[in-house]
Image (cartoon, rainbow, N blue to C red):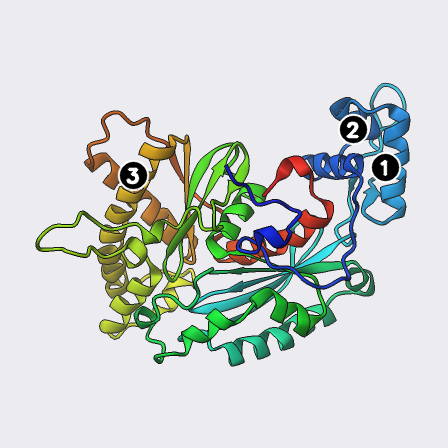
Amino acid sequence: MTSISPYPNSDSVQHWQRSGGNQRSVRHYNERLILDIISRAGSLSKADITRMTALSAQTVTVIVNKLIQDGLLKKMDAIKGRVGQPSTPIALNPDGAISLGIKLGRGSIDAISLSFTNTIIGRRRLRYAYPDPEVIFGWIRENVQSLRDDLNPEQQNNLTGIGIAAPFHLSGWEGMIGAPEGVMTKWDQINIANQISKDTGLDAWLINDASAACLAELRNGQTLSNSGLYYYIGTFLGGGIVLDGKLFSGLGGNAGSFGSMPQGLITPTTPKPQQMVTACAINTLEAMINARGLDDDFILNERPLTQNETDVFHEWSEQAASALAFVIISSQALLDTDQVVIDGSLTSPLIDAITQKVTESIAAYDTQGLTLPTISKGHLGIDARALGGAILPLQENFGLDSNLI
């Protein structure tokens, strides 16, 4: 089993790319342990930390005081009214560590700044027909600087790095997005993390975009916990796999590439079945919308749909749900997990609708011999991939070894 380690090295370049040298970090295990349990709980007293870590009260006091002095933790108002001395909760300092995240996709790019408590501080977004490297890197330089300029002095001083979420085969499926021939192949010659690090002066990490979305749901969502399958409906279909509370990456960092699964068997009439990549994809939905002369803004902007918009979404979701149900059942036969989470770059009501249709479609298949997972909606939507990217520098510098991603 391969899990993405928060300590990338030259042997895992397919999973990560990293360069730069201005990170702020803690390296001691017990410091990371205390930061981790406080992050998960929201706030804890020193007595709570002592009980949960099995460290001595003196050790906890020394470490907590150091982390407060370093600006990573802060004391909250004392809780009075209980028996004994007032309890003083300790929490993460939101400004104690800041990271940036970029989602570089085939149809849009997002950049965010993220606090130590995983709150998005600022964001920038650009939609395009296809990602031209010259346009993309110019946009990144300008908007990363803009996000940095918007940070206060403490936040700027505590900036730890930048995480990039992007398809590992960005040049693939060029014809499906209507890019001019040869433009996308430029990406094959570019080390994205190194280029962004050079342009911004920040440490940079690269992760598959759908894996990043899965990571964000695992760390920030309300659904994934121990083991599960995660499906992200973006320009194309992607996803991630969580096993034993860890993001499973596979040999080349592409585990969960559900879009590359074939739609059916090879037969005399279908010698080369199509992949699932477009069967449940926003690229297909946009093509259907445009063919009807409609505006695709309802995909991203939550508002009441017109009858024509409802009709085209219903037509797309029927075929998309059937395809996704097939993928889920096939994956479940292999992995036997207890959770399935569906999210994507659609409004929350549209994700609700497709999730419900997937549940109905699964019921129409023969699932004898399988234990079916619970199916639920993700909670991060269009922010999931950039958020997952922004988590990487924080995980690298402050995360636990036992929380390998």
The vertical placement of 150 against 239, above or below, is below
Nearest the viewer among 83 and 27 is 27
Question: Alpha carbon of mark 1 to alpha carbon of mark 2: how far?
Answer: 9 Å
Q: Secondary structure at mark 3?
A: helix
- Kindly identify which residue carries mark 3: 330
Q: Which residue is mark 2?
A: 49
Relative image position of residue 315 (x, y in whole percent): 22, 57
Going by the numbered disc 2, the residue's amino acid type is Ile
Going 33% across and 65% down the picture, which residue do you hit? 283
User: What residue would you read off at disc 1?
Assistant: 64
Residue 26, horizontal then vertical, whole percent? 79, 46
CB atoms of marks 1 and 2 within 8 Å: yes
Q: Amino acid at mark 1?
A: Val
User: Does the rendering let one see residue 76?
Assistant: yes
Farthest-out residue, top: 83
Q: Amino acid at mark 3?
A: Ser
